[in-house]
Image: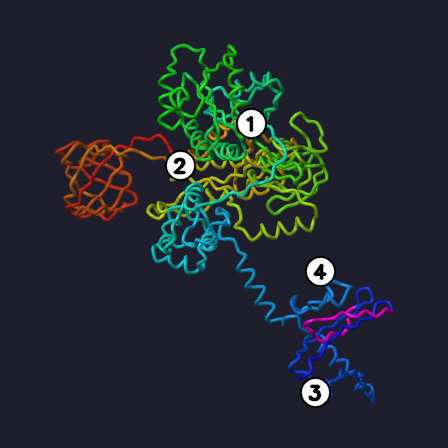
Amino acid sequence: MKYKPHFKLSTTINDNDLIWNLTKPKLIDFLRDRKNIKLNVKEFSINNIDSKFYKDGKERKYKATTKINNEVDIKKNKLKFKKKSRTKIDIKDKDLLIDTVNSSLLNSNEINKSLIKSHKLSKRKKKSKIESSSLINIDNSKGTDDRFSNDTNIVYINHPLTIYELSSKLKIPETEIITNLFLKGIPVTVNQVIDINIATELAESYNFEVVHKSSELAVKFNTKVEDAIFDSLKPPVITIFGHVDHGKTTLLNTIIKSTVKEVGGITQAIKSYEIDWPYDSSSKKLIFLDTPGHEAFCRMRSLSAQVTDIAVLVVAADDGLKKQTIEAIEHIQNCNLPCVIAITKVDKQDIQILKLKEQLAEHGILDESWGGNYPILEVSAVINKNIDSLLSAICILSDMQDLKVNLKQLGSGVILESYLDKQRGYVTNIIIQNGVVKQGDIIVADNHYSKIKLIIDEKGSKKEQVLPSSIVEILGFQSILQAGTTFDIVKTEKEAKFLIAKEQKKEPTFDITKILNTRVTLDSYKNKSSIKQLNIILKADTHGSIEAVMYAFSKISQDKVQINILNAYSGEVSQNDLQLAFNTNALIICFNRDIPSHLKNLSNTLNIVVKNFQVIYDLIDYVENSMINLIDLEHDKILIGEAVIQTVFSMNKGSVAGCLVIKGKLEKKSWIEVYYNKNLMYEGQLDSLKHLKDDVNQVYEGNECGVMCDDYNLWLERGVIKAYNLQEKQKEL
């Protein structure tokens, strides 16, 4: 019977001997120092054991002795020792099973894996491993969830994008895309922006299925939302939607018992209000968000729909459904929001409530009394009609949703607004959706993190901590963040840096200024005429205002004059802005941001135009008029006569065409077109007109005349001259 050896692992810890019985042995040397334990691992196989260890069936101990003759041998031995230590391999968990029956000192769960030195990869292998892992972690698209990444034939395109961004989405080299477009007659560079139509056509040529809305994308996948553990109810967030001048702010003023007055009579920012309403024998806290109704603020309305719990759709009884009303209905339906419809201004005469309800039904909003799911209430802020009923309906919807949150977890939510304040620095408005946010917490949003220095509520009071549904201002970030960015509270800076590194792998957020600058569209290649540009430096009070103004600019026709945004930031006008405007002949357009007095004097000296607006209507009108002023005068051509060239005379001043007027009349200083064989040879002004030897202003049908132009002498017999009166056209974009 062959002898099966039994191995023991012997260590020395503070001069106390410990013996571990191993069921799967490996030869282990103690080298690494950790609490006086030195451990080194070397592969050892029972099948390859030298016979001298088991001679006569006995286990023997050998002490290795080395004779060192000189310093050279010492260095060689050190070098060999280092090489051996670098090639030590890892012991797997299954190879370190301790015989717990024979050992009461340790069990398998107490083994410190940090004592085992792991195998080191060579530099080449390590580099390839890092590259392969980084390729695996790349996000396909910011617009798609990780759950969708397994379907590579679907791509999400919802805005114009650069060639580089499209290449990242499709995972196709930029050079191939550029070549593909060049063969279609569209030369582009890697940083040029192409519109959605070109991007869609290109993606489909590579067999991608393109979706343009996140709702379309979600339908294609069966997604699951994991259940969470909740601790308590949170106050509902109620967003007021509606068209301009339909009474949203007036209704809110009645609810919160305030007299808020908006500049220009319209809301131009997201504003929050908080009330306590007596409901069901207790006081219920309600958080209201007022949204702008102007078309330009669509981004703000979309963001509000994403963070709200309940929607209130305001429709004026005397105006009916309008563009932004229909847009709000789409937000409500896409986000599947519980909603109350408030028909306002019912105190007015000649209103048709039934017709309005029919219009709502056509868009999927059916009254509960008609068998639908939406309560429709007739309210009036002027006579205080049904305001209590509206608030009670909101409370009922809140109870039905059972809005619970986890107060034990770290806070998270969404950034509503961000701007630079001259006195306080960078200010960020946030809404907390879950957990608790405290002063001193580390907050992470997008590629930025910071400690929260100060929390201020809607009343201007400082807070140590805030709960879910709270809408507050925080100070701490060192830059302006994009509205709609999510944020998270983390415990350590290390975790914050990890989240930022993960975020940086995602596709960067689309820069809205690209919509206007160096755009490549299908129409631009059909009409290759030169387009004039209006350079603008845009300054606004908040990042959301910047987006709204940019959106409004994108809706202005730019077939003749294109808006070129050189700079768009929130904050005051700086000296750098004046320098840039002076060098580029740009306008400085401010929205709720006036210029400091000393810079205003400098701008006057340099003849730089700086305009500040408080109402977006006025700003848009001014920019449109500035664009119109750049357009060349255009005229309508009214045909007044035709003549045939019978002969050509040479004179000292040039050539004269001898003509016969065959229709209407020729008139001095009229606009003429000269044709030969139906081909246009010349167009310009008729400078000289003679009848016989006399200079005349007009020659009528049936008479002969001589025609001369200062800049044209290539008259040909049998050519045709058409004369026009030019009527100046009104300039338009």
For mark 3, give the secondary structure: helix
Rendering quarter of residue 275? top right
Rendering quarter of residue 561? top left
Residue beneath label 1, please? 289
> How far, Cα to Cα, is label 1 from label 3?
84 Å
Crowdedness near tag 1: few (<14), some (14–19) or many (≥20) residues, C-alpha within 10 Å: many
Residue 271 drawn in magenta: no
For mark 4, give the secondary structure: helix
> How far, Cα to Cα, is label 2 from label 3?
92 Å
Crowdedness near tag 3: few (<14), some (14–19) or many (≥20) residues, C-alpha within 10 Å: few
* Magenta range: 15-32
Residue beneath label 4, please? 109
Percent x, y for residue 445?
61, 43
Residue beneath label 2, please? 557
For mark 2, give the secondary structure: loop
Crowdedness near tag 2: few (<14), some (14–19) or many (≥20) residues, C-alpha within 10 Å: some
Mark toward the viewer: 1 or 3: 3
**Image quarter of the C terminus:** top left
Identify the residue at horizontal 36%, vertical 50% (top origin): 201
> How far, Cα to Cα, is label 3 from label 4?
35 Å
Percent x, y for residue 356?
38, 20
Question: Residue lying furthest left in this view?
Answer: 702
Circle 1: residue type:
Leu
Circle 4: residue type:
Asn
Sequence-first tag of 3 and 4: 3
Say whether residue 466 is left or right of residue 324.
Answer: right
Q: Is residue 601 visible?
A: no
Sequence-first tag of 1 and 4: 4
Q: Is residue 207 visible?
A: yes
Is there a contact, CB below 8 Å, between mark 3 and mark 4?
no
Sequence-first tag of 1 and 2: 1
Q: Nearer the viewer, residue 557 or 133?
A: 133
